[in-house]
Image (tube, helix red, strand yellow):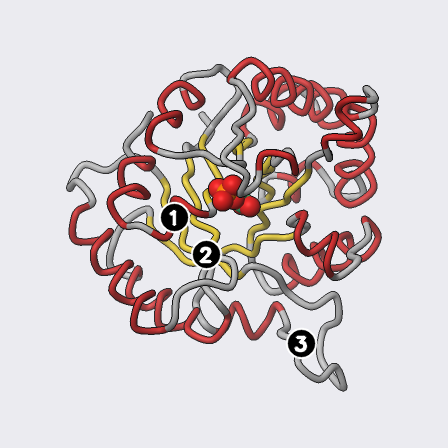
Amino acid sequence: MRKNIVAGNWKMNLNRQDGIALVEDVLGKLPADNKTHVIFAPSFVYLHKVAKMCADTPKVVAASQDCSSNEKGAFTGEVSASMISSCKARYVVLGHSERRANFTETNDQLKAKVGQAFASDLKVIFCCGESLVQRESGVHFEWIKSQISESLFHLSADEFKKIVIAYEPIWAIGTGVTASTSQAQEIHAFIRNLLAEKYGKEVAESTSILYGGSCKPSNAKELFASQDIDGGLIGGASLKADDFLAITQSF
Ligand code: PGA
């Protein structure tokens, strides 16, 4: 069956020392029989260090928060998927709403990034989600469908097995407002249904769909108990070892 995953998206937080201390703390306290797949997504700058720290712990790996849509060349400041892969990261987070909003990432660009990630053997955590205005005007289902279909539906069923979806309503990110369990479950079921229509039941049932947006120890258990919520993409609460740990053990 599908994996339960808790991924910590550190965003532009924590310097190298603080990041290392956090990973040490989490790895040291993770139960020996931990069943959750745990992912740290730190800054590129110390991604290699974090990936190396995770290497000996089963089910714990590192991810980058983005990658270039180009393979290599004259793109000053960009980081390619192959560079990320060579740093031993296993995943790349793509299409976070902050990147879509602040760096005008389009569905087409994300499609190219997915291609680069796969060419370098990285799995993808693909983010989607609607704004409050979109939800209130009732276009959120169509919006999420277009985000997923325009960036991912060129993939084969086999390729799609390397995709994890993260549903992150923009109005819940960093705001302290969490989607209610039923609001989240409704979208997760919608996404799974979309995948079933496109790829069939087997792919849909084996794809992990994570919730993100003010997920914390106090609400993770209830969210993760929902049929179609397979874990979380955690921002703020991933910066504190004990909170992040508690979320990883909330299944
Ligand atoms: P948050 O962020 O947990 O701080 O709301 C989630 C995210 O943006 O991935």
> Is label 3 within 8 A of ligand 1 (CB to nearest ligand atom)?
no
* Whether label 1 touches label 2, CB < 8 Å: yes
- In the displayed structure image, the side of residue 212 where residue 19 appears, left or right: left
> Measuring 41% from the left and 50% from the top, which residue is drawn there?
39
Q: Horizontal and vertical percent for residue 197?
A: 76, 20
> What amino acid type should be assigned to the residue bearing mark 2?
Trp
Q: Horizontal and vertical percent for residue 222?
A: 40, 18
Up/down of 71 relative to 225, above or below: below
Split into 4 quadrants, where in the image is the N terminus?
Answer: top left
Q: Horizontal and vertical percent for residue 150?
A: 83, 41
Tell me the crowding category of disc 2: few under 14, some 14 to 19, or many 20 or more residues within 10 angstroms, Cα based.
many
Give how far apart the Cα atoms at labels 3 and 2 are: 19 Å
Tell me the crowding category of disc 3: few under 14, some 14 to 19, or many 20 or more residues within 10 angstroms, Cα based.
some
What secondary structure is found at the residue carrying circle 2? loop
> What amino acid type should be assigned to the residue bearing mark 1?
Ser
| Residue behind mark 2 | 10
| Residue behind mark 3 | 78
Give how far apart the Cα atoms at labels 1 and 2 are: 7 Å
Split into 4 quadrants, where in the image is the C terminus?
Answer: top left
* Whether label 1 touches label 3, CB < 8 Å: no
Which of the numbered marks, if any, corresponds to residue 132?
Answer: none
> In this orientation, does residue 208 appear?
no
> Measuring 72% from the left and 33% from the top, which residue is drawn there?
130
Which of the numbered marks, if any, corresponds to residue 238?
Answer: 1
Front position among marks 3 and 2: 2
What secondary structure is found at the residue carrying circle 3? loop
Q: Earlier in the sequence, mark 1 or mark 3?
A: 3
Q: Nearer the viewer, residue 170 or 193?
A: 170
Give how far apart the Cα atoms at labels 1 and 3 are: 25 Å
- In the displayed structure image, the side of residue 102 where residue 5 appears, left or right: left
What secondary structure is found at the residue carrying circle 1? helix
